[in-house]
Amino acid sequence: MKCRKCGEPAILELRRHNAAFCAPDFVDFFRNQVREAIRKHRMFARDEHVLVAVSGGKDSLALWDVLIDEGYRTTGLYLDLGIFDYSVESKAKCEAFAARRGVPLLVTRVAEAVGAPVPVIKNVTRRPPCSGCGLSKRYLMNRVALEHEMAVVATGHNLDDEAATLLGSVLHWQTDALSRQSPALPSTHRKLVRRVKPLYRLSERETAAYAFLRRIDYIVEECPFAKGATSIAHKEILSRMEDASPGAKHNFLFGFLEKARPAFERAEAVTLNECARCGQVTTGTVCAFCKLADQVKRATV
């Protein structure tokens, strides 16, 4: 197996691209995919300050690594979920990466913002832990970006993540979610920053290979609360399809983005308000985050 670009022995085969690459050319391929994502969707400009949401995992740290080497001005944001040893280790990975690369890292504790860490939120709400966790992360990423005058938040969602999310939305025909599924969500309110996903063209396997070749030290373990999540089941289904037909995930996601999403986007008409409590964006009077904080307070006081 030879590298498609230079003809030297390849270290990685990418069946969906019908190609194989040596280590240096794969790193170039990976970075080119990120560059193309940023260019095509005009995710951010060279002079913008990008807030990179990092979890300590391979995807977000790989993204941060690429953006640093591309010369973008970045600051990392680690949201401490308070999930036992998992959060302790993942935070340490982010801090070590930031120190090694000489870049700033902000740390925000969910417990301080909501009133309790994710394990307590899970017990209080009696909903799947990913529900309260996801709500808190979206809210805090936006709030921190606004507080530090950054117009865009970049997350490490990859092709597998996006395809699995799309499958879940289609299975339940969640039209509101389908209208928002995009590599780049624009700001539709003065208190809502742009959200972008520069890794959406790259698979989880490709991101893992990049992190390995770049010697990025990341947390390997999955979140302990992820067990049994429907998103994992959706990923497994799509991976079986990918094994049988390389490119299935890409075709599913990109076909939706190019051919179907515009129809759902046109159907979306939501009035955005400012939360009467915290001032952040909501479709009602009080935002879901403030309601969650109230629920936690009532249960823990």
Image: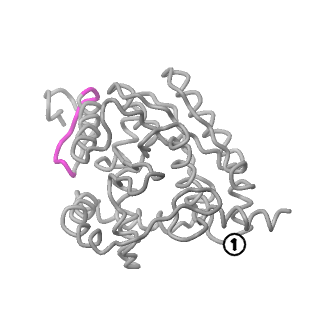
Q: Please tell me which residue lies in front, 92 or 232.
A: 92
The magenta segment is 16-24
Which is more toward the observer, 108 or 271?
271
Q: Give percent across and percent down for residue 69.
A: 35, 25
Q: Is residue 151 left or right of residue 125?
A: left
Q: Which amino acid type is marked by label 1?
A: Arg
Q: Residues within 10 Å of mark 1 (few under 14, many from 20)?
A: few
Q: Is the residue 191 above or below the residue 123 in the image?
A: above
Toward the bottom, the furthest residue is: 172
Task: Please identify the quarter of the rendering in which residue 78 is found.
Answer: top right
Secondary structure, mark 1, is loop
- How are the colours assigned in the image? one colour
In the displayed structure, 184 sits above or below 273; it is above
The residue singled out by tag 1 in the image is 126
Looking at the image, which residue is at 21% across and 64% down?
A: 255
The residue located at (51%, 20%) in the rendering is 102
